[in-house]
Amino acid sequence: MKTPSAPAASADEIDLNVLFFKLRRRWPVFVVSLLLAAAGAYLYLQVTPPVYTYRATMLLGDQATGSKRAQDLLQMLEVQQKGLKMEDELGLITSAGTVQQAVRRLPYAVEYHQEPATWLNGFRPLVVRQQPATAMPFAVAPALATPQLTNVRVYVEPAGPGRFRLHADAKRGQLVDLRTGYLMRELTDVHLDETVKAGDTLRHHLLRLVIRPNHTVPFGQTGERHSFLLRDLPTAAGLYASGLAVRPLAHDSRILELRLKSTVPAHAVMFLDTLMAGYVAANLREKNNTGRKTLAFIDEEIAKLGHARRQAADKLSEFRSSQGVVDVGAQSTAGIQRLNALQTARAQAATRQRYCQDMLAYLRANRDATQMASPSSAGIDDGVLSSLILQLGELNGRRAALKVSGSDNNPLIQVVDESIRSTKQALIETLTNMSRTASIGLRDLDAQLGQIQGQISRMPENERQFSLLKGQNDFNEKKYTFLVERRSEAALALATNATDKHIVDRAQAAGSGPDAPNPKLVGLVALLAGLLLPAGAVVLLDKTNRSIQGQEDLAELTDIPVLGIVAHGSRADTQDLLHKSKGPLAECFRSIRVNLQYLDKGPKKKVLGVTSSMPGEGKSFCAANLAMELASTGHRVILVETDLRRPTQAGYFKIPSDGPHGLASFLSGRSSLAEACRPSEVPGLDLLLCGTPPTTPTHLLESSRLTELLQDLRTEYDYVVLDTPPMVLVAEYFVLMRYLDATVYVVRHNHTDRSLVSRVNELYEAGKIREVYIIINDVRLTRSYEYRHQQNAYGYYR
């Protein structure tokens, strides 16, 4: 009994040796695949237009720069200026609005094409190259305000001197407003064939345009075809945006790199430069709008203050006229200042008077006084008084020096004493006069203080009213002056405003040539495709192949022993086996005969049934050759064709198949055994063929005559080989199974389905069929990894 375990698990594994063998065996497929891939790569390189990459860089700068003074003025309104993030900048640059603004400044409406005179374009226009307007022999100027036929290629041909023929054919088309992309009408079966004079307006319900010649480019001399198609603004912008990529140069960098892929280098340069210039100009306009809003706000505030300023000035003037004062606040301040000055002067006069009185009392009480306080210490600045005090001090010092060397009777000392007495007397008189003068000044100052204090007591009410009017007027004046100054600064800032975005590098090629298509990369892809696609197909077909490939497959499905294999032979080989005793086929059946005789040590198997699952698997061929091989060993063998539905044995032995005598006629009682049986060209081999196929083969095989026949044949012959019907398709095999000593089950290599073998194995495991042996027929040795070496072994017998 078969117990599936490890082999089933290993069935999903790929044996590289087997895989390489199968791939190597199919080398013509790889050659064809590589040739097709190379042809496809060549066509791709010819058909695909070259794509160029252009790059440009732009500095975003600091968002706080540009119109900074105007922004500072807006701080009084508490308007917070917030800078954009890098992601926002990238989104703005690549937005549809920004791209459309740039494309609107370009000649977007006309797209020119050229078809070279190559053999590829002989079938259909495969090689089409977009060209700039300067490379075309004509220029088209469509009327943007009129709906036009878009996305349909219009061919232009010369139609004589100064004339052009425009023609187009398409199954579908659209009438579109070029400026907005608005679809006016859908069109079907578009046909256009018009001739127009250069410089004249073509007035057609599909097109309205003017076409002019470009005399610098030859037209109609090289066999090339020229055409154009019209694009609306959103479509043209979408084409540019699809090839645009914007990214910062580094993570924290504020320099952006703009890259554009395009088939027309001139268009890429114009678009990138226009996009950057437009973005910078838009930023400057936005900043100028901020400055203009600031000026408008300041002008509005100045206009409001003008009326309030005039009203406050009129009220202040009226108050001054009615109260008879010029400036109450100034007068009040002056009175206070005068009062303070008088009080200070009185204090100084009182101090002078006390000093004089104190000095007089000191001099009168001390006639010999020598130490006097300086008048400057009391705040008295009098030159005469200071001179007398200084002179008195000097005389006292001279007297003290003379007294050291003499007595009081010394004439010099007496002279000095006289000078001291006279100086003191002068000092007393001076102090007396100064004291009298100070008393007079005090009385005068007291009178002035009384007058000033009376005036001040009457000032508070007028000062309050005047201060209120004066404060309101001063506030309006200061605010007005402030706004006027700020307006001048804002106007200057607006006049000198600059954007914080700058173009660093204008558009230039990112490489020395086109980026795509890359011939090396295309060649590599073609090589990989040419190798991998057939390899994948081989692996896929191998994994999905449900047919028997060899003994390994049978080992996974059944425990029925395998007698051997039958190599594949040509039709001539299979038809001429009667005369060939050497070769791969003969050796295969010789090996099967030996295995059949010595495989089982039990009783000799005289009656052998050769069957298969379905027709076409070679059971009849194997039965005939097995019978001939058994007869070649000196045994008496008879081959009985019990497959009465599709008899084929007559063809192998070159005997007419429509004879009146055979097994069918014998079983039906119309022929004797001697009439039905005939010898073959192989010594020892007799044939009992079907004859004319009967209408009821099953009834004939179930008759007692077949039982008697096989009993007689078993005693007369050494081996009885039955060519039985397929066991899966009809029931005749199971009728014959009771007469068989062994069954040879023929499995055709790379033909018999695994499920059929599984069904036979179920019968074998259930014990319904016994003594079963398998032959693998039609094995192509050179195409089988399992039997690849047997081809050389069979060559030994040639």
Image (cartoon, helix red, strand yellow):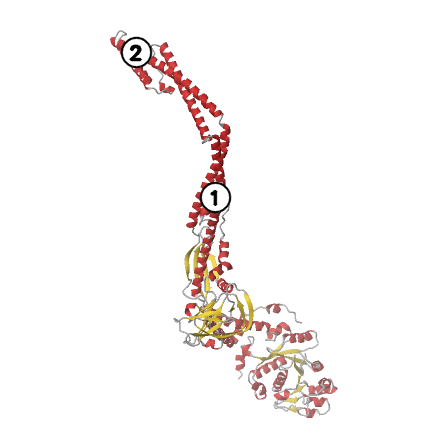
- 302 above or below 115? above
- Which dot marks residue 557? none
Location of residue 406 by image quarter: top left
Q: Residues within 10 Å of mark 1 (few under 14, many from 20)?
A: some
Q: Residues within 10 Å of mark 2 (few under 14, many from 20)?
A: few
* Residue 425, position as x, y percentages in the image: 32, 11
In this view, the residue in front, 660 or 561, is 660
Q: In terms of depth relative to the viewer, which is nearer, 792 or 716?
A: 792
Tell which of 125 and 762 is nearer to you: 125
Q: Is residue 699 above or below residue 161?
A: below
**Residue pushed farthest right?**
704
Image x and y of residue 373, in percent: 36, 16
Residue 665 vertical position relative to residue 547 in the rendered view, above or below:
below
Indicate which label's residue lies in the foreground, 2 or 1: 1
Indicate the quadrant containing the N terminus: top left, top right, bottom left or bottom right.
bottom right
Instruction: Report the amino acid beneath label 1.
Output: Ile
Instruction: Tell me which residue sits at (59%, 72%) in the image.
Output: 544
Secondary structure under tag 2 reads: helix
How many angstroms separate mark 2 from mark 1 (CA)? Answer: 81 Å
Using the rendered image of the protein, determine whether residue 661 is visible from the camera's viewpoint. yes
The residue beneath circle 2 is: 422
Of the residues shown, which amino acid type is indicated by label 2?
Ser
Count of numbered circles on the image: 2
Q: Point out the tag, 2 or 1, that comes first from the N-terminus.
A: 1
Nearest to the observer: residue 559 or residue 165:
165
Q: What percent of the width, then of the height, locates residue 763?
A: 69, 75
Badge 1 marks a residue whose secondary structure is helix
Q: Residue furthest top?
A: 409
Does any portion of residue 581 appear in the rendered image? no
Q: Position of residue 748 (x, y in %)?
A: 61, 79
Per the rendering, the mark at residue 302 is 1
